[in-house]
Amino acid sequence: MHKVIAFLLLSLASSADALAQRSLKRLPLTAMSLREADSASRSDGRPLFVYLYLRSCPACRSFEAATLSDPAVRKTLSEGYHVALLDAGSRATVEWRGGRFRWNPESGMNEAAAKLGKGGNAYPMTVIFSSDGALHQAIQGDIGRDEMLCMLSYVYEGRWRTQSYDAFRSVRLKHLSTVRQ
């Protein structure tokens, strides 16, 4: 009897994760597991983009529909980044950088989400790493298209090596607003 209950609980958890992945299929992003994307990033030099979300989060759905579905954002992500999607509430074990992260019943979140977000718990959350594994951005909340393109360009173009993000951002956002007019 205990085996049947355990099987049903595992089936329910894995079908919930499958449902979350299906719901994100509406995003035209090719995503890998966190471990695969991190490994690919370190191998070929493209940065790593991690999108942390919750299935029940209205701000996440808004962010997906507006910012992540924007053609310029999709193009930048598909051409310049390795992408990983992570449901912060997932009960699945997540493997990353030699660690195994599990669902924490006290917080109701996967430990990987807390590690990636440096303890932050506002979703959606965007986390960007350069190919050397250095964390560049961990942004909580629904940011807009221009801010997202600015962050993506900063890391992808390697500007982080020579320029502060604030200096890069002020020039880039002026350029983006001029292009849109």
Image: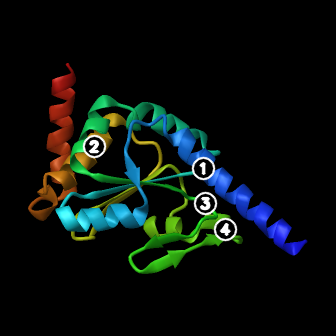
Badge 3 element: loop
Mark 2–mark 3 distance (CA, rounded to whole Å): 25 Å
Q: CA distance from mark 3 to mark 1?
A: 10 Å
Which residue in the rendered view is the most extreme toward the left? Answer: 162
Q: The C terminus is located in which quarter?
A: top left
Compare marks 3 and 1 and give the one earlier in the sequence. Answer: 1
Residue 145's image quarter? Answer: top left
The three-letter amino acid code for the residue at tag 2 is: Ser
Q: Residue at x 12, y 58 (%)?
A: 163
Amino acid type indicated by mark 3: Ser
Query: Is residue 33 or residue 145 the one in the foreground?
Result: 33
Tell me which label, 1 or 4, sits earlier in the chain.
1
Give whichever of discs 3 and 4 has the lower sequence position: 3
Query: Marks 2/1: CA distance?
Result: 22 Å
60 shown above or below 52:
above
On screen, residue 145 versus residue 120, left or right, reads left
The circle drawn on residue 18 is 1
Helix, strand or loop under label 4: loop
Residue type at tag 1: Ala
Q: Dot 2 corresponds to which residue?
A: 78
The disc at residue 90 is 3
At mark 1, the secondary structure is helix
- Type of amino acid at the residue the image marks with label 4: Ser
Marks 2/4: CA–CA distance = 33 Å
Instruction: Please name the residue that numbered disc 4 is placed on.
Output: 107
Q: Quadrant of residue 49?
A: bottom left
